[in-house]
Image (spheres, rainbow, N blue to C red):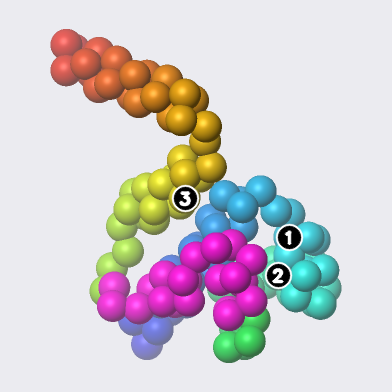
Amino acid sequence: MTELKDKKAIIASRIREARKMAGLSQAQVAKILELHRPSVSEIEAGNRNASAEEIAKLAEIFDVSVAWLLAEGVDKVDIHDNKLQLAARELQKLKPEDLERLLILLASMRTGRDNL
């Protein structure tokens, strides 16, 4: 039973994270799915199961795979890994010069940490 609860929590967390990374509000997602906003809130809280059709539409809206949303093939989710995957998607949207600046910033942050 705990395994099922964990899986529901993972799915809810991934939906919430993906929505935020897509820059959409719960109301916007609800409108696209033709649901009421509280329904999206309940899905993100893990209190309501999303239908197969809703999961497919969410994956399309957020530009992620259904397998990722459903945490398929994953026993325990590393939240850090989730954020890295979503960040990578956002990085693809940057202009090359902005990406280069960001890489320089990351390198300097890493170097600063090494000197502590």
Q: Is residue 47 visible?
A: no
Q: Residue at x 41, y 47 (%)?
A: 88
Number of other residues with Cα within 10 Å of mark 3, as a class: few under 14, some 14 to 19, many 20 or more: some
Residue on which the image places disc 2: 40
Number of other residues with Cα within 10 Å of mark 1, as a class: few under 14, some 14 to 19, many 20 or more: some
Identified by mark 2, the residue type is Val
Element at label 1: helix
Write the start and end of the magenta stretch as one range: 55-74
Element at label 2: helix
* SS assignment for the magenta stretch, majority: helix
Residue 42 lies in quadrant: bottom right
* Residue 38 vertical placement versus 82 (above, below): below
* Residue 111 vertical placement versus 43 (above, below): above
Is 65 in the magenta?
A: yes
Q: CA distance from mark 2 to mark 3?
A: 23 Å
Q: Residue at x 69, y 66 (%)?
A: 41
Percent from the top left, x then y, of residue 56?
A: 58, 80
Q: CA distance from mark 1 to mark 3?
A: 20 Å
**Which of the image's four quarters has the N terminus?**
bottom left
Residue on which the image places disc 1: 26
Of tags 1 and 3, which is closer to the observer? Answer: 3
Element at label 3: helix
Number of other residues with Cα within 10 Å of mark 2, as a class: few under 14, some 14 to 19, many 20 or more: many
Dot 2 and dot 1 residues touching (CB under 8 Å): yes
